[in-house]
Amino acid sequence: MAVRFNEDKELVEIIKKGLKEKGGYCPCRMEKTEENKCICKEFREQIADPDFEGYCHCMLYYKSRD
């Protein structure tokens, strides 16, 4: 299992800027809750799932199974 940034460097920079502006909370979500603090609860659960492969909600991270 490996977690890496999206290959699209421009997208990564946009999302990182949004994270900075929102104090580390997912720029794609309205609520500033602990569940939405990057790395969000949803993606932490996906990371823990051995069968999951794919991007997090905001497309910043990608989890591969290899």
Image (spheres, rainbow, N blue to C red):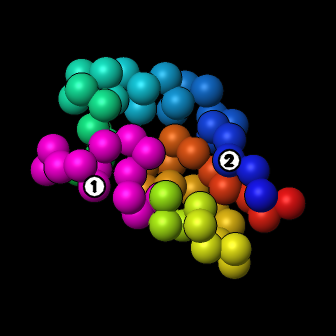
Residue 18 bears which disc, if any? none
Q: Which residues are magenta?
A: 31-43
Whether residue 44 is situated above or below residue 38 in the rendered picture:
below
Q: Find disc 1 in the rendering and name its residue.
A: 35
Residue lying at 39% horizontally and 41% vertically, measured from the top left: 38
Q: Secondary structure at mark 2?
A: strand
Q: Quadrant of residue 41?
A: bottom left
Q: Secondary structure at mark 1?
A: helix
Q: Give the quadrant of the N terminus.
A: bottom right
The quadrant holding residue 32 is top left
Is 45 magenta? The answer is no
Sequence-wise, which precedes: disc 1 or disc 2?
2
To which residue does mark 2 refer? 3
When the figure is inspected, residue 43 is found, relative to residue 14, above or below; the finding is below
**Kind of residue at disc 2:** Val
Of 6 and 45, the residue lying toward us: 45
Q: Amino acid at mark 1?
A: Glu
Q: How many marks?
A: 2
Give the farthest residue toward the right. Answer: 66
| Residue at far left of view | 31
Spot occupied by residue 57 in the image (x, y as percentages of width and height): 43, 56
Which quadrant is home to the C terminus? bottom right
- Tell whether 27 sits left or right of 44: left
Q: Position of residue 14 (x, y in %)?
A: 42, 26
* Res 6 visible: yes
Mark 1 neighbour class, 10 Å CA radius: few under 14, some 14 to 19, many 20 or more: some
Q: Residues within 10 Å of mark 2 (few under 14, many from 20)?
A: some
At 55% across and 25% down in the image, what residue appears? 10
Q: Is residue 18 visible?
A: no
